[in-house]
Image: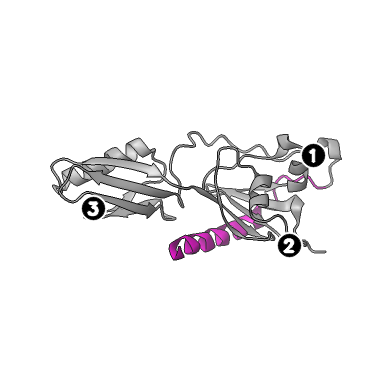
Amino acid sequence: MQKALCFFCAQLAIIAAAAVLAGCGATTAGMPAGQRHNPVLPDEGNVAVFRPGDNLVVTLQGIPDPSSNQLQIDDQGLISLPYIGALKASGETAAVLAQQIREKYISKKIYTAVDVSVTATERYVYVGGEVARPGRVVWAPDLTVTKAVQAAGGFAIYARQAKVSLARNGRSYVIDAALAERNPAEDPRLLPGDLLNVPKSAF
């Protein structure tokens, strides 16, 4: 739990800095209501690949000391397993990561044969700033910006809903959540590891 909170705090620091830059990007402010649009997020490819913050279970079988290891991918994209140490997990699928772990154990001559399985338990997005319950929100394939805010307890009273910052893979986008609530087509879907930060209104 402490590790997850540290990861969340570190990511919020990143998103706060990114929000400053995002303020210079495309926004919906000052445009006629019929012409407002949220940014179209780039296609990030295979959603099945693991990302920092994902929780995994790595099971080793067919060996004298079978084990089930509950791990979290750190902000460097790494996991650590007994005898083989750190291994890159971010960007890999479950099948590829399982094969890499197996090969690592065999190449290091820890085992001559081992069966490895990798499964993701819960994956998360992170919601911070002016919401009722900042923190992790469990990701699902249909999770959008407005659904994530609702899962975090909704906007706080001084939330600046038109300037929600969404950070993904080192880039930041400004989302008008009020527009997204009115028009579902303007409500971007989220990926595991996305970070939302709701700024405080000046008024």
Badge 2 density bin: few <14, some 14–19, many ≥20, Cα 10 Å: some
**Residues under labels 1 and 2: Cα distance?**
22 Å
State the quadrant of the N terminus.
bottom left
State the quadrant of the C terminus.
bottom right
Which residue is more in the foreground, 123 or 196? 123
Stretch in magenta: 1-29
Position of residue 107 measured from the top left corner of the image (x, y, whole percent): 17, 44
Q: How is the image coloured?
A: one colour
- Magenta span contains residue 64: no
**Residues under labels 3 and 2: Cα distance?**
46 Å
N-terminal of the pair, mark 3 or mark 2, is 3
Question: Where is 98 relative to 153, above or below?
Answer: above
Badge 3 density bin: few <14, some 14–19, many ≥20, Cα 10 Å: few
Badge 1 density bin: few <14, some 14–19, many ≥20, Cα 10 Å: some
Position of residue 27 measured from the top left corner of the image (x, y, whole percent): 74, 46
Which residue is more in the foreground, 15 or 23? 15
Position of residue 22 measured from the top left corner of the image (x, y, whole percent): 66, 51
Instruction: Give the SS element for disc 2.
Output: loop
Per the image, the residue denoted by label 1 is: 36
Q: Which mark is residue 84?
A: 3
N-terminal of the pair, mark 3 or mark 1, is 1
Per the image, the residue denoted by label 2 is: 200
- Name the residue at 68% across, 59% down: 131
Instruction: Give the SS element for disc 1.
Output: loop
What secondary structure is the stretch in magenta mostly built from? helix
